[in-house]
Image: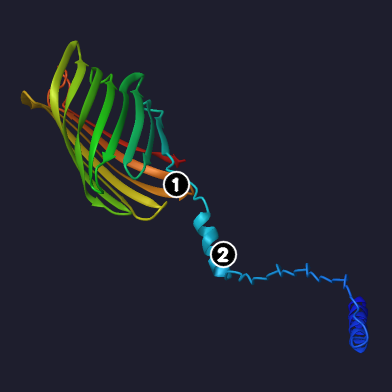
């Protein structure tokens, strides 16, 4: 409205000036100058962008990828067995056995430890007195080849073996390595330190061994056998042979019935003693 009034005033003055021009000369000064400045600038800053939600399958896959996997555990599996045979009457006899074996297998290492003891008597006279222990570590180079280190200790009071320590190392190969069946062969040098009777003896040996096991199913039944030969390197006619064959059948959950035959042969026994010792053992086994 102010602009309109100003425009009307300007036109009014111009009209007066035109009408009065012939008669007189008038000086008109226009002092009202109007300046219009536009200072309001509107900027649109709100831009809405549509964000697409990823499919549920993609979200689930991402969650699975980012999930931290639990480390794989390789537990020790142990077996404890015991048996007792007792007779009274015309003959009084006692035979007690106990054995524990534990092993652990990982993709690159295998550990096997064990100990057993046997004590027997007949009519008050001891006829069995044996304590034995062993440990073996296998390091796998491939699926079937491995290197091993083995230590073994023995005391046999009836055979007059005060002590016998055997340490061997070498290489092994799995001829069969399946889920339920394994067959392995081993060879390597070692040393035997022993006292038989009153004689101390230390000699180098070469260990040749094989071991076999077959499981009929996971926790029901299995059979096994193993043999090792330890000849004296500088006198091959002196050697030891240790072997075992056995079978096991489940009775209830972790409880099984086990029977095995041990045969220990010494080509050079103590004087007046036989070369062969055979032992048949049956007992109940608990696995944990």
Mark 2 vs 1: CB contact within 8 A: no
Query: How far from the left and from the top, in percent, is residue 56?
Result: 58, 69
- Label 1 crowding class (10 Å Cα cut-off): few <14, some 14-19, many 20+? few
Q: Secondary structure at mark 2?
A: helix
Q: Secondary structure at mark 1?
A: loop
Query: Which residue is located at x 88 percent, y 70 percent?
Result: 31
**Depth check, front residue: 56 or 224:** 56
Q: Is residue 70 above or below residue 188?
A: below
Q: Is residue 178 above or below residue 228?
A: below
Query: How far from the left and from the top, in percent, is residue 65?
Result: 49, 57
Query: In the shown orientation, is residue 244 left or right of residue 50?
Result: left
Numbered tag placed on residue 166 in the rendering: none
| Of the image marks 2 and 1, the number of the one nearer the N terminus | 2
Numbered tag placed on residue 72 in the rendering: 1
Judged by depth in the image, the label closer to the viewer, 2 or 1, is 2
**Depth check, front residue: 65 or 266:** 65
Q: How is the image coloured?
A: rainbow
Q: Residue furthest top?
A: 198
- Name the quarter where the N terminus is drawn: bottom right
**Depth check, front residue: 155 or 34:** 34
Q: Which residue is mark 2?
A: 59
Query: In the shown orientation, is residue 273 left or right of residue 70?
Result: left
Q: Quadrant of residue 10?
A: bottom right
Query: How far from the left and from the top, in percent, is residue 161?
Result: 23, 19
Query: Which residue is located at x 41 percent, y 34 percent?
Result: 82
Q: Quadrant of residue 199?
A: top left
């Amino acid at each position: 409205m102010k602009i309109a009034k100003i425009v009307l005033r300007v036109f009014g003055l111009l009209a007066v000036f035109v009408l009065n021009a012939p008669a007189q000369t008038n000086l008109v000064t226009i002092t009202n100058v109007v300046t219009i400045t536009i200072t309001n600038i509107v900027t649109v800053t709100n831009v809405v962008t549509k964000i697409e939600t990823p499919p549920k399958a993609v979200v689930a896959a991402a969650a699975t990828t980012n999930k931290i996997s639990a480390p794989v555990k390789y537990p020790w599996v142990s077996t404890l067995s015991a048996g007792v045979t007792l007779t009274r009457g015309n003959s009084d006899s006692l035979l007690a056995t106990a054995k524990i074996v534990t092993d652990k297998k990982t993709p690159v290492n295998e550990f096997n430890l064990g100990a057993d003891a046997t004590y027997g008597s007949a009519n008050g006279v001891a006829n069995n007195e044996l304590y034995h222990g062993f440990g073996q570590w296998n390091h796998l180079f491939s699926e079937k080849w491995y290197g091993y280190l083995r230590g073994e200790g023995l005391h046999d009071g009836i055979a007059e073996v005060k002590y016998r320590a055997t340490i061997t190392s070498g290489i092994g190969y799995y001829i069969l390595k399946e889920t339920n069946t394994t067959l392995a062969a081993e060879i390597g040098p070692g040393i035997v330190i022993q006292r038989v009777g009153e004689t101390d003896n230390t000699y180098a040996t070469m260990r040749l061994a094989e071991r076999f096991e077959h499981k009929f199913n996971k926790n029901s039944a299995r059979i096994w056998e193993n043999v090792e030969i330890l000849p004296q390197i500088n006198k091959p006619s002196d050697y030891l042979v240790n072997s075992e064959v056995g079978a096991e059948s489940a009775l209830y959950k972790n409880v099984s019935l086990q029977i095995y035959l041990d045969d220990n042969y010494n080509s050079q026994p103590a004087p007046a003693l036989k070369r062969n010792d055979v032992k048949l053992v049956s007992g109940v086994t608990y696995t944990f």
